Amino acid sequence: MISTLMADYRYIIKPRASRKIFSFYQNVAKKYRHTYDKDDLKRDVQNAVFSIFRIENGLLRREPTISQWAGYHMANTDKWYFAYTIDGDTITVVDARHAQNMRSSESSI
């Protein structure tokens, strides 16, 4: 679990969310091993994690569009969707999905 203080909120990133981000880019690295190197992997994971800190500070709070996230808030960046809760000044990110994976999960509901 990752925890940090940013702006007015304390952010907690649950292991499930961080695993999903890392495993997505790890799969990209396996698929495109000749053109996607470790530096690309590190940069993309870092960018995805940094985008979490825009939740409630630039990203709009939305109602979830997938049933697995019922009861959570949802925010999206250009590449990632995040399910999260807010308790006082703490934002807990519980799940993450890459935008290209959202289409397939929405159609299966």
Image: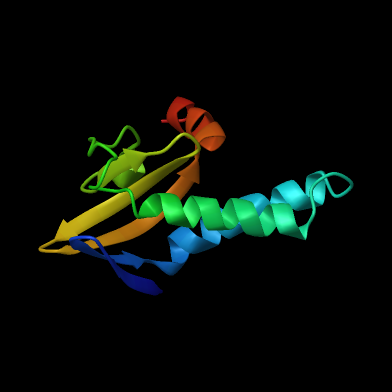
Q: Does residue 101 appear left or right of residue 62 in this picture?
A: right
Instruction: State the quadrant of the C terminus.
Output: top left
Q: At 53% across and 51% down in the image, what residue appears?
A: 47
x%, y% of residue 38? 76, 59
Whether residue 26 is visible: no
Point out the residue furthest to the left here. Answer: 88
Q: At 25% across and 36% down in the image, what residue appears?
A: 60
Q: Quadrant of residue 4?
A: bottom left
In-front residue for pair 59/85:
59
Q: Does residue 39 appear left or right of residue 58 in this picture?
A: right
x%, y% of residue 85? 22, 55
Q: Quadrant of residue 37?
A: bottom right
Q: Does residue 29 appear left or right of residue 53 in this picture?
A: right
Point out the residue furthest to the front here. Answer: 7
x%, y% of residue 15? 45, 68
Count of marks overlaid on the render: 0
x%, y% of residue 1? 41, 74
Whether residue 67 is visible: yes
Q: Taking 35 as reference, is 53 above or below it?
A: below
In-front residue for pair 65/44:
44
Q: At 14% across and 64% down in the image, what residue appears?
A: 89
Q: At 73% across and 58% down in the image, what residue appears?
A: 39
